[in-house]
């Protein structure tokens, strides 16, 4: 999860914590990652997982992350992060972590870390390395308009303020930009950091929870949609550039729905998959 150490990016500054003891860190939650008045769930997770990863430096890549959201985070307030190693193996390590504010747990997380391979550039498709890998399967990336022909998330009628757009550049495929106009719950588009920070595995965890909810196209403007549980599988290290995302919901019952998401990098290699249980408040 290392980034360019010669540059300082908002994401790195605002997810970094100060170590208080061997298994305890603190940071002040930034407000520029908010959806409405609440910090984005992917941002909170990135803060906690950055601390958790320091306990297993030999296996730096998060490959399986499951998070339960207990209460909203509190922007501008100190957060206490605690983590411990559950298992330290030869190829993978499992760590648990909790974030608390005002003495109450906000999220809990269990993550398995390992070593992932990078994606393969299109220009390297005929290399000996790619020929030797005969055990790779992944869904094809969707064909989307280029980012410059898409609609920014800020232009969508979402019934909520979006301070997070100070930090992220999110472009939505125009066919999904009108709320309540589809019979299916689908969302697709592009995402990157506004300050052009290079994408890495930690960023993918944030990106899995940063697009407008897929229910937007079916349900209409629904405001803040809190996550109850989020599971992410990071599959490959991404190539630089935009990340392409597609999200869908096929299960809605009452105010609860399950959303499945997939991310690809600019070389159209699958880099992460997610599934989350979310709540419609209205």
Image (spheres, helix red, strand yellow):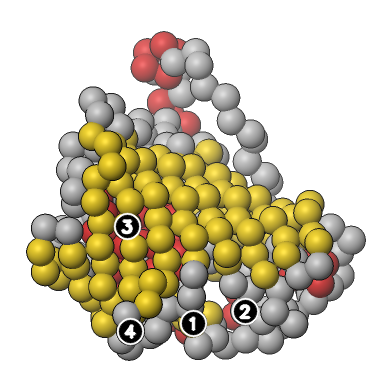
Secondary structure at badge 2 equals loop
Image quadrant assignment for residue 188: bottom right
Q: Which residue is mark 2?
A: 224
Residue at position x 17%, y 43% from top?
A: 57
Place of residue 190 in the rendered image (x, y in percent of width and height, measured from the top left): 56, 59
Q: Which mark is residue 97?
A: 3
Which of marks 1 and 2 precedes in the sequence?
1
**CA gap, disc 2 to disc 1?**
9 Å
- Total marks drawn? 4
Instruction: Answer with mark 2 or mark 4, whichever residue precedes in sequence.
Output: 4
Q: Label 4 vs label 3: CA separation? A: 17 Å
Q: Where does the image place residue 216, in percent across and percent down from the top left?
A: 74, 70
Which is in the foreground here, disc 1 or disc 4? 4
Q: Which mark is residue 230?
A: none
Q: Which residue is mark 4?
A: 102
Residue in front for this viewpoint, 64 or 34? 64
Q: Residue at x 10, y 64 (%)?
A: 21
Q: Is residue 173 above or below residue 275?
A: below
Q: Secondary structure at mark 4?
A: loop
Direction front: furthest residue: 103
Given this view, does label 1 or label 3 mark the residue nearer the observer?
Answer: 3
Q: Nearer the viewer, mark 2 or mark 3?
A: 3
Q: Circles 2 and 3: CB distance less than 8 Å?
A: no
In this rendering, position of residue 39 left or right of residue 57: right
Q: Viewer-proximal residue, 130 or 42?
A: 42
Q: Secondary structure at mark 1?
A: strand
Give the image location of residue 232, x and y in percent: 50, 48
Q: Residue extending furthest right?
A: 183
Element under disc 3: strand
Q: Residues within 10 Å of mark 2 (few under 14, many from 20)?
A: many
């Amino acid at each position: 999860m290392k980034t360019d150490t010669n540059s300082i990016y908002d994401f790195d500054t605002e997810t970094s914590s100060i170590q208080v003891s061997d298994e305890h860190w603190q940071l002040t939650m930034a407000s520029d990652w908010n959806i409405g008045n609440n910090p984005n769930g992917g941002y909170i997770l990135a803060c906690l997982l950055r601390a958790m990863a320091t306990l297993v430096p030999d296996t730096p890549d998060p490959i399986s992350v499951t998070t339960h959201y207990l209460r909203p985070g509190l922007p501008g307030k100190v957060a206490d992060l605690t983590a411990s190693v559950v298992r330290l193996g030869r190829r993978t390590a499992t760590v648990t972590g909790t974030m608390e504010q005002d003495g109450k747990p906000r999220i809990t997380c269990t993550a398995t870390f390992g070593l992932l391979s990078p994606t393969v550039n299109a220009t390297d498709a005929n290399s000996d390395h790619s020929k030797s890998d005969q055990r790779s399967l992944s869904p094809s990336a969707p064909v989307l308009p280029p980012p410059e022909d898409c609609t920014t998330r800020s232009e969508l009628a979402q019934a909520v303020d979006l301070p997070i757009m100070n930090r992220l550049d999110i472009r939505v495929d125009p066919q999904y930009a009108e709320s309540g106009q589809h019979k299916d719950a689908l969302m697709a588009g592009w995402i990157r950091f506004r300050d052009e920070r290079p994408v890495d595995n930690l960023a993918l965890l944030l990106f899995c929870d940063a697009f407008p909810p897929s229910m937007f196209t079916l349900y209409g403007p629904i405001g803040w949609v809190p996550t109850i549980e989020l599971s992410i599988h990071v599959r490959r290290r991404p190539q630089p550039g935009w990340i392409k995302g597609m999200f869908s919901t096929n299960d809605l019952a009452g105010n609860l729905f399950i959303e499945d998401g997939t991310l690809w990098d600019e070389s159209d290699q699958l880099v992460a998959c997610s599934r989350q249980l979310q709540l419609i408040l209205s």
